Image (spheres, helix red, strand yellow):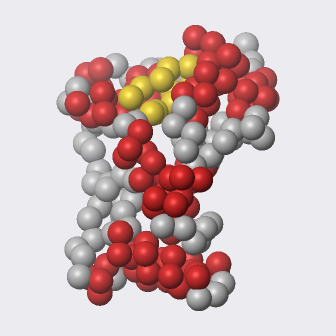
Amino acid sequence: MSEPVLLVSDENLLGTRSAYLFAPLKYERFEAIAKSIDQACRSPDLECRYVVYTRDLERWRKSSYNQSAKTAKHLLDFQTWCDKNDNLKGPDQIVEKLRAALGERLVVVAMEDELGSGVPLGSAVLSACGLSSNEVSDLKTPQPSNVSMPPNALELIRILGEYGLEREATKKVTQALRQNGHLLGVKSREHND
């Protein structure tokens, strides 16, 4: 890069939490958080750009459920959780509020579109940082390291929670299941959840 670049990548940065994307947004403050971050980063010597990824709603709901179940935020099965987290417009509402705060500096990318184009996932972020398309295509892509929890592991975590297992103990069980998925008869697969 010809200029210094600071890349900050975190789904929580703008006040979003993957476990709550489909919950009612009445108490969320995405626009205010985005404005605060943008104001704090504003400088004549610094150009800030923002990239937000969206994805297929059904896969996103399943991922959101997985994120909340494996950290013992609830004891619900998937369908009951979906019934309580039925705001399918939640992700679009978040994007609208972020666009209102950040304007043209916000780039919204559908994850499936980027993956389907043959470029590595995250290319839009690297392009926003100033890398050319040739530089991005020359990068070697590491294997994903976010291991998805198989459905029977999530169900075991949920049942243990119903029996009163404390949240910290549940996190330890989650970690053990991640490392030993074969115990449940499911081969661990690496997948960006």
The answer to whether any part of residue 5 appears in the image is: no
Vertical order, 110 against 140 (above or below) = above
Q: Where does the image place residue 102, in percent across and percent down from the top left?
A: 66, 18
Where, quadrant-wise, is the N terminus in this rendering? Answer: top left
Q: Quadrant of residue 40?
A: top right
Image vertical order of residue 102 relative to residue 79, above or below: above
Where residue 89 appears, x then y in whole percent?
Answer: 54, 32
Q: Is residue 139 left or right of residue 97?
A: left
Which residue appears at 48% of the width and 67% of the height?
Answer: 77
Which of these two is toward me, 162 or 18?
162
Q: Position of residue 14 (x, y in %)?
A: 66, 36
Q: Is residue 46 left or right of residue 135?
A: right
Locate residue 119, reporting x and y percent.
Answer: 25, 30
Q: Nearer the viewer, residue 17 or 126?
A: 17
Rendered image quadrant of residue 16 = top right
Instruction: Judge left or right: residue 103 versus residue 180.
Output: right
**Observer able to see residue 155:** yes
